[in-house]
Image: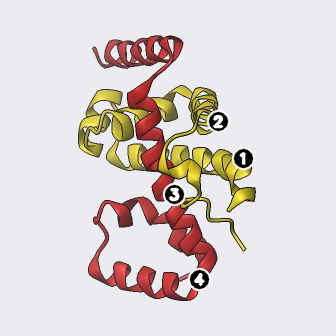
Chain colours: A yellow, B red
Amino acid sequence: MLADWSSTPEQTHLSAEARRILENAIDSLPDHYRAVLILRDVEELSNEEVAAIVNDSLGSVKSRLHRARMVLREQLTRHLGTRA
Amino acid sequence: MTCKDAIAILADYLESTLSPELVEKLDEHLRDCAPCRAYLATYRETKSLAAEAGRVEMPEEMKTRLREFLRAQLRERR
């Protein structure tokens, strides 16, 4: 069974530990993935805007975004999943 | 729909850009698949936590590298 840590206390407020895990995970992403993730999920630009900024296709932006989120999710699951 | 198929379209699912047919198939899969429901919940949470972490504090080095990357992208286009 896959651990669902989305409703653990860490989720309610970003704990220092979760922030550290996230920052490390974001930092370890390749540049192309990190840029798309930050522009999309932090800056909340549209997929089309991000594609224009990073000079790539919409499909490639969506694919990189999805993979970047999956890497972060994996890291968070590794650290928080055992508490779910 | 397999679990792999389901996970591949989660981003589009959250952005409501899937066709009604695919939404129906995914909903049906999620009803019967607890691991995929957990995956969706944690994927959604990851997106929200990353946004929160990024808004609160993006390390200076990361900001610098992002700026450099974007400048390089712009240079390539010229």
As drawn, B77 above or below B35: above
Which secondary structure lies at badge 3?
helix
Which amino acid lies under the numbered mark 2 shown in the image of this protein?
Glu
Q: Is residue A65 visible?
A: no
Which secondary structure lies at badge 2?
helix
Of label 1 and label 2, which has the lower sequence position?
2
Q: Position of residue A73 (x, y in %)?
A: 59, 50
Q: Quadrant of the C terminus of chain B?
A: top left
As drawn, B34 above or below B57: below
Q: Position of residue A22 (x, y in %)?
A: 58, 36
Measured Cα–Cα span from mark 2 to mark 4: 30 Å
Which amino acid lies under the numbered mark 4 shown in the image of this protein?
Cys
Q: Are marks 3 and 1 in contact (CB under 8 Å)?
A: no
> Could you tell me which chain the residue with mark 4 belongs to?
B
- The residue identified by callout 4 is B33
> Could you tell me which chain the residue with mark 3 belongs to?
B
Q: Are marks 1 and 2 in contact (CB under 8 Å)?
A: yes
Measured Cα–Cα span from mark 3 to mark 1: 15 Å
Q: Position of residue A27 (x, y in %)?
A: 59, 26
The reply, left or right, for residue B10 in relation to residue A3 is left
> Could you tell me which chain the residue with mark 2 belongs to?
A
Q: Is residue A22 visible?
A: yes
